[in-house]
Image (cartoon, rainbow, N blue to C red):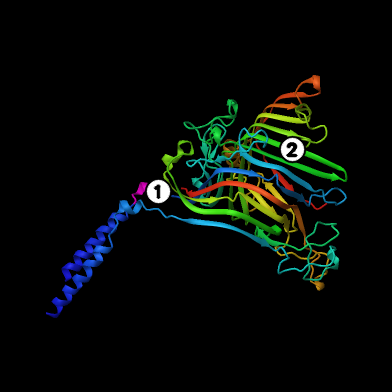
Amino acid sequence: MISKTWLALGALFALPAYAELQALDDDTLSGMNGQGGVYLSGEFSINKDGGVLWSKPASNNPSTWTATQRSCANAGASTPENCGMRVAIRSEAEGGWYVLDNLKGVFSFEGLTLRTRTINSGFGGDGAAFNQDVLEFGLPNEVKFKDGSFAFGVANQGGWQNKSLSVANGGNPSYQQTNIFSAKIDGTIRMQGNVLVFPQN
Amino acid sequence: MRRLSVVGAMLLSAAAQAELQALDDQELSAVQGAGFGFVLDGILMDASGAVITINDINNASGQNVPIAVKEFYLGATGSNKGANLNPVNIGRLDHPFEITLAKGESLRTLRDDGQWVQTTPSNISVLEFKFPERLTGAGGQACISGYAAAGSNCSSRASERVDLGIRFDFQVAAGRTDIINLDFSELVMDGSYLRLWGDDPRGQLVGEARVNIFAKSLQLMSCAAGTANCTTAQEQTARTLTLSNAYANISLGYGKSQPLLFDVSSNGQFVLELPNPVTRAANGSARPLAERNAIASDFYANAPRTNIVIDNLKAGTGSFSTGGYNFGYNSIQGLSINYLKVTSRDL
């Protein structure tokens, strides 16, 4: 008796549940697309006021800096400058390092978008055959740079060392870094369009 | 009850079979190398509103010679040197830019005779960044419109070419600025790639690179438009070097025997090297004669060559009467680099 009652109750509960949730068949499921996306506007700055590794010295002459000071102004410049971020990569087991140095500045943009998009038409006839979803990065119309800079160089050590100071004073006279070039960017660059990303075998 | 649960399990398993389908061997073998493709849709770039300066290039007395970058633009063809910029699609959905990590034996390189050959060593993982592929046979597009000699193996169509320009102002000394103004029209770079992998005996990053540049025209002007003696069309033409129907296939490295070595020496200098493919093995040991011959035959048969072809090179108007000159057709073809070593030095 008891078990029959429970069964009946169970059937009652189970029935409404079936009525509310309906299973989707494969066709319907595969027709579903994620919607929505992200719209980003913003401003970010990298090492605008110097980083955590070095503080700004009073002069641009390396021999006057203390062990924790570094200026990244061009050689021969009269005033010192804060240093930006540094990334060093070693391409050989026993070799030197490629360095992306002094990466700093303020970058601001309006309307960087990230969303998915189904492409099944257009693109000069390629879209219909393609017929799949892509990830779309919409470039902001304008990117503003303020005191943006970076330097590309090579060095014999990953970390920067002051070659004008003795080892006892926190420097390393054998340190060698050769900057191939450096660049500064100020102002507005117009960048419009989308980057469409999709898997590829 | 037990019967019910068995039926339930059967229902569940039936549903699972409907969703997951087994791949047969043929399908499985077609799956290789994870990577992704990307295309640029409606791209336009214009940096004329920004001040870009390149520093750290010094003159003989150690002073910085700043290079101001101006009039940088990228847009659809027909831009009239950037004056009329329109968005352009670069790369096609079926021939996109690609970043892949693949086995060396699955990569192919187009030889000048139209054959696809393997140039990377087998059994290594190669990180490849490549531009839209070149096509042999059906579907290939003329790489330079109206100039058959540049071949018809580009995948990008005429509407997927770009106009690109950049001006460099070299502030050589106080009161003197030297200018190079570059304007490419109908530029396409199909078939370019950069492949990187680790070389075990050498213990370093090596690779091979191909840079293909096809342009309907490239103009180099030595003055800034709108400045003194550089205003009228006539004045500007007089100071322009024009390359028409120009293309370059620059090949650096042949992975099997002459990889391009990206190197920084232990004393902090930049080294770019293409080693001699036959003299020494990567670990420094000498090779027997038969092996050297085999490597050399393979190198000469398959290593990609460098070509630089300018159908017409013209200084100024190209006519004697105005002081110009027409140099006509210039080319370097089938160049193979046997050994190259470039090292930076501190001045």
- The magenta stretch is B23-28
Q: Which mark identifies residue B29?
A: 1
Residue B162: percent from left, percent from top:
61, 37
Question: What amino acid is at disc 1?
Answer: Ser
Magenta highlight on residue B27: yes
Q: Name which of mark 1 and mark 2 comes first in the sequence.
A: 1
Secondary structure of residue under mark 2: strand
Question: Residue A120 lies in what quarter of the image?
Answer: top left
Secondary structure of residue under mark 1: helix
Label 1: chain?
Answer: B
Q: In the image, what residue occupies the spot 68% across and 35% down?
A: B81
- Circles 1 and 2 on the same subunit: yes
Q: Which mark identifies residue B181?
A: 2
For label 2, count other residues whose C-alpha is less than 10 Å away and answer few (under 14), some (14-19) or many (20+). Answer: many
Residue B300: percent from left, percent from top:
60, 36
Question: What amino acid is at disc 2?
Answer: Asn
Q: Is residue A18 visible?
A: yes
Compute the Cα span from label 1 to label 2: 50 Å
The mark closer to the camera, 1 or 2, is: 2
User: Vertically, is A115 above or below B160?
Assistant: below
